[in-house]
Amino acid sequence: MSVHGDSEVLLTPAEVASMFRVDPKTVTRWAKAGKLSSIRTLGGHRRYKESEVQALLGAASDDADHADS
């Protein structure tokens, strides 16, 4: 998506949703609940830090691995 001043890649809700295989509205609910931090663009749209999304995705896959054991 775009690159911020600290060279952090920012993802749209749709991009995050496709990574988790959920609806984009679910990603927005996660942000409102504080499970995922978001950055607001000048137009009011939410963007998510790729590094944070990857960390959450890794934690989610770890939880799924432990559930299978």
Image (cartoon, rainbow, N blue to C red):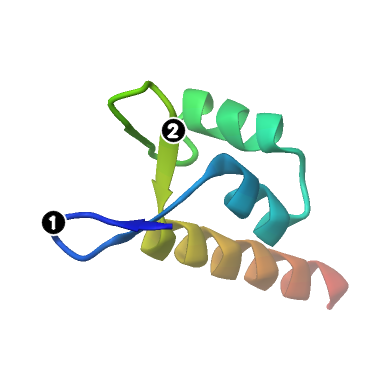
- Secondary structure, mark 1, is loop
Q: Amino acid at mark 1?
A: Gly
Q: Amino acid at mark 2?
A: Arg
Q: What label sits on residue 37 in the rendered view? A: none
Picture layout, residue 14 above or below residue 31? below
Which residue is depicted at the point 32% across and 31% down?
41
Quadrant for the N terminus, please.
Answer: bottom left
Picture layout, residue 28 above or below residue 63? above
Report which quarter residue 57 is drawn in.
bottom right
Q: What label sits on residue 46 in the rendered view? A: 2
Q: Specify whether 49 is left or right of 29.
A: left
Q: Which one is earlier in the sequence, the residue at label 2 or at label 1?
A: 1
Residues packed near mark 1 inside 10 Å, few (<14), some (14 to 19) or many (20 plus): few
Which residue is depicted at the point 76% across and 67% down?
64
Report which quarter residue 7 is drawn in.
bottom left
Quadrant for the C terminus, please.
Answer: bottom right
Question: 63 or 26: nearer the eye?
Answer: 26
Question: 8 or 57: nearer the eye?
Answer: 8
Q: What label sits on residue 5 in the rendered view? A: 1
Report which quarter residue 2 is drawn in.
bottom left
Residue 56 at what x, y percent from top left?
A: 52, 59
- Secondary structure, mark 2, is strand
Which residue is depicted at the point 46% across and 41% down?
36
Residues packed near mark 2 inside 10 Å, few (<14), some (14 to 19) or many (20 plus): some
Which residue is depicted at the point 42% across and 41% down?
47
Question: 7 or 30: nearer the eye?
Answer: 7
Q: Specify whether 57 is left or right of 31.
A: right
Residue 66 at what x, y percent from top left?
A: 74, 72
In the picture as drawn, the residue positioned furthest to the right comes out as 68
